[in-house]
Image: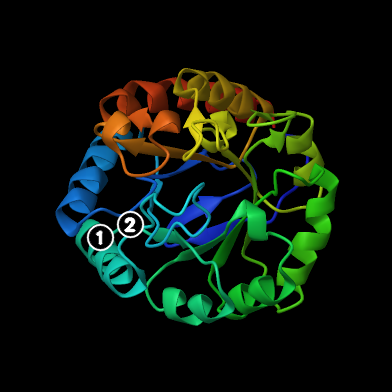
Amino acid sequence: MTQTPTTIVTIGDIAIGGAHPVALISGPCQLESLDHARMMAERISEACAPTGTRFIFKASYDKANRSSLGTSRGLGMETGLEILGRIREEFGVPVLTDVHEVWHCAKAAEVCDVLQIPAFLCRQTDLLLAAGETGRAINIKKGQFLAPWDMKNVADKVASTGNRRIMLCERGTSFGYNTLVTDFRGLPVMAATGWPVVFDATHSVQQPGGLGGASGGQRQFAPVLARAACAVGVSALFIETHEDPDRAPSDGPNMIPVDRMGALIAELRAFDDLAKSLL
C-alpha cells in the first residue's frame, strides 16, 4: 500500500495522502452540547500536541441509523451545525459531520470542511452526487456489505461531479450476525484506486445491534487494529472518543476514553513514521 501513489486531499492546512503523516479524525460520536464539544476539542488538541498530529474534529448532529427507535439521535441539523461552526472558529480546526439526505449536503457544506457518507448509504447515487457537488472533501465509509474493490465505483460517482477531494474509509465488514471483521488486504486494494484511505478503528470493533436495542463494541481492540492500519500505511485514522464512553449517548462501547488518547496517538505516530519511512 505504501507504494501506491495517492491523490493528496488538502483540508484546511492538513494534507492527507502520500507520505504525509497520518492525520486524525476524532471527536464524540454524537454532539451533546456546545460546552461538551468545546471540552472534547480541547482535550483532543492537547492529546495531539506532543506529536504535532493534525486533527479534524468529528461529531454528528443526527444519528439516523440507530439500532432502535428509542435511542438518542442527536441535537438536529440547525443546532448541530451552529456548534460545529463555533468549534471550527474557536479552535481553528476543520470539522466533519455525517449527511444522510440529499438536502443535507449544501446546508452542511456551509459550515463543515468534510462531509461524511455513512456506510449504509455509500451506494446512494443521489447522495454521493449532491455531496460531491458541494466541493467539500468527502469521506466515504465503505459499506459493511461491500468488497473493497467495489469502492472504486462509489468514488467514481463523486468524482463525476469534478470533485477530487475524496477519501475512502474502512470500518469493518459484516461477519455473521452482530459482528464485524477487518480484512487488512482491503486497505491496499482501496488505495489502488488512487484515493487516500482512512481507517475507522472504533467502528471496526462495533457489534451492530449487539445489545438488542443498541450496538455493542469491544473498544479494547480498537488500538490493536489502529496499529495494524498504521503499519500498512493509511493516510488518516478515524477514532471516536469521549470523556466517559460508558455514559455516551451513542456508540459508547466502541469509543476510546479521551484521557488515553495522548498515549495512543504517540504510539500510532511511531508506527506511521516507520511505515512511511519506507516510501
Residue of label 1: 87
In the figure, residue 181 lies in which quadrant?
A: top right
The C terminus lies in quadrant:
top right
**Percent position of residue 111, x then y:** 37, 73
Name the residue rendered at 50%, 28% in the picture.
217
Looking at the picture, tell me which residue is in the foreground, 182 or 198: 182
In 3D space, how far apart are the residues under numbered discs 1 and 2 (Cα atoms)?
A: 7 Å
Name the element at disc 2. Answer: loop
Would you call the spot at circle 2 few (<14 residues within 10 Å), some (14-19), or many (20 or more)? Answer: many
Q: Say which mark, if any, is on residue 93.
A: 2
Vertically, is 68 above or below 87? above
**Percent position of residue 262, x then y:** 31, 26
Q: Is residue 127 left or right of residue 49?
A: right
Report if the CB atoms under discs 1 and 2 are less than 8 Å apart.
Answer: yes
Vertically, is 94 above or below 39? below
Name the element at disc 1. Answer: helix
Would you call the spot at circle 1 few (<14 residues within 10 Å), some (14-19), or many (20 or more)? Answer: many
The N terminus lies in quadrant:
top right
**Percent position of residue 54, x then y:** 40, 45
Looking at the picture, tell me which residue is in the foreground, 215 or 130: 215
Q: Is residue 27 visible?
A: yes
Q: Amino acid at mark 2?
A: Val
Furthest-left residue in this view: 35
Name the residue rendered at 30%, 63% in the picture.
75
